[in-house]
Image (cartoon, rainbow, N blue to C red):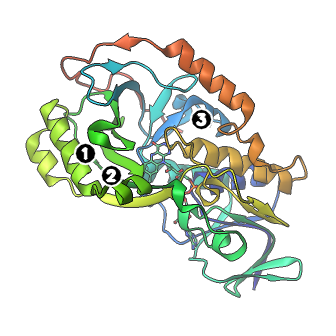
Amino acid sequence: MRSVETIIIGGGPAGSACARRLVQNGRDVLVLDKARFPRIKLCAGWITTKAMADLEFTPADYPHPILELDIRTHFFALPFALNWFPTEGANYSIRRIEFDDWLLRRSGAQTVEHEAKTIRRDGERYVIDDQFACTYLVGAGGTMCPVRRAFFAPREKSRQIVTLEKEFAYPARDDTCHLYFFRRGLIGYAWIVPKGNGFVNLGLGGKAKYFKSSGARIQTHFRAFLDDLVAEKRLDAATAADVQETGHPYFLFTYRGDIKRDNCFLIGDSAGLASVDLGEGIGPAVESGRLAAGEILGLGVYRKEDISVFSFRGFVRRLMARASRRHLAPLPSRARGGSGRTATTTP
Ligand SMILES: Cc1cc2nc3c(=O)[nH]c(=O)nc-3n(C[C@H](O)[C@H](O)[C@H](O)COP(=O)(O)OP(=O)(O)OC[C@H]3O[C@@H](n4cnc5c(N)ncnc54)[C@H](O)[C@@H]3O)c2cc1C
């Protein structure tokens, strides 16, 4: 049996942020992930300045293409977009296949490709599949995290979000990011997010409850969204016809329920930390990973209230950011070619 002080199950942004802080403080950490990295993760790949600051990097440090986003927000079927977004500082897009691999490597933690199945308590230790044992166990396995299943209450179904998305090379894309809220009655939103290297990510997400109660199919909404993008000249018809979308469920922030028990912690999506308004999950995943590491290091206590997406201070800051950015901007009349604000740098 391999024995280490801390085992983190899941090497996404939550797991690698936690691992990095522990490794930086000289601790013995092992990350188990069932996937071989670089791995695909369904995600629009929008990140905030705050998430980047928590991860201790700037666009200039990032070794892959990163694009500063010019975000346009559309509500219902209104014929104009708002140049408005409720975050502080600039927003960027990355590709998760590159980002997560870089973060995990940069953490300096030992990693093993292993799918955790059976997790049990053995006195003061946690034992995983009778192969690994640890004093501290961190559940960072995303929506289906096995640590959550083993030791914590099931999540509230009412907070479940379902999504469909696709990321593909589309050099002809517009450099502007568009978000469409409540279009065609959807309780949720759709997006088209340009990436720095000529890729684009488009998708749609909504409350599972909405699809269940209205009888609307998410696939129908997705196809209608592609038609709208073609009509708005953001996508050509042949590309739209070829899009093979994939789906994923996840959970928004659930205030009820524990995220810590004894020496076992839930971080990121395993704790349902994505924000309620936009489903932003990378920022809270990183913050929670760092806070859980702080408790393992004896530097603080891991509490939901300290994750800024849910703290009162964070709420007030977001409201103020909202108020200061509220102004109308016309829809861009034609695609802006190129990737003028793309930063491509070396490590
Ligand atoms: C379609 C979509 C679009 C999104 N867009 C955005 C966005 O633009 N911006 C944003 O901030 N958030 C977005 N989110 C949310 C964001 O992707 C998540 O909140 C974020 O990835 C959470 O990170 P994590 O580290 O908790 O989990 P994950 O990134 O899901 O990582 C979990 C890891 O655990 C591993 N794992 C799972 N089970 C096991 C097991 N049994 N054993 C070992 N390993 C295991 C997985 O292989 C995976 O590598 C989006 C989500 C979806 C579904």
Residue 338: which quarter of the image? top left
Per the model, the C-alpha gap separating discs 2 and 1 is 14 Å
Q: Amino acid at mark 2?
A: Glu
Q: Which residue bears the numbered disc 1?
A: 169
Q: Give the mark nearest the N terminus, 3 or 1.
A: 3
Give the vertical position of 305 relative to 213 (above or below). Answer: above
Q: Which residue bears the numbered disc 3?
A: 52
In the displayed structure image, the side of residue 132 where residue 55 appears, left or right = left
Q: Nearer the viewer, mark 3 or mark 2?
A: 2
Q: Residue 60 appears at what percent x and percent y?
A: 53, 29
Return the residue nearer the eye: 191 or 338: 191
Q: Which residue bears the numbered disc 2?
A: 165
In the displayed structure image, the side of residue 86 where residue 263 appears, left or right = right
In the displayed structure image, the side of residue 63 where residue 228 appears, left or right = left
* Residue ranking furthest to the left: 238
Residue 234: which quarter of the image? top left
Residue 105 visible to the viewer: no
Residue 287 visible to the viewer: yes
At x 29%, y 58%, the residue is 215
Give the vertical position of 167 relative to 142 (above or below). Answer: above
Q: Residue 305 appears at what percent x and percent y?
A: 76, 43
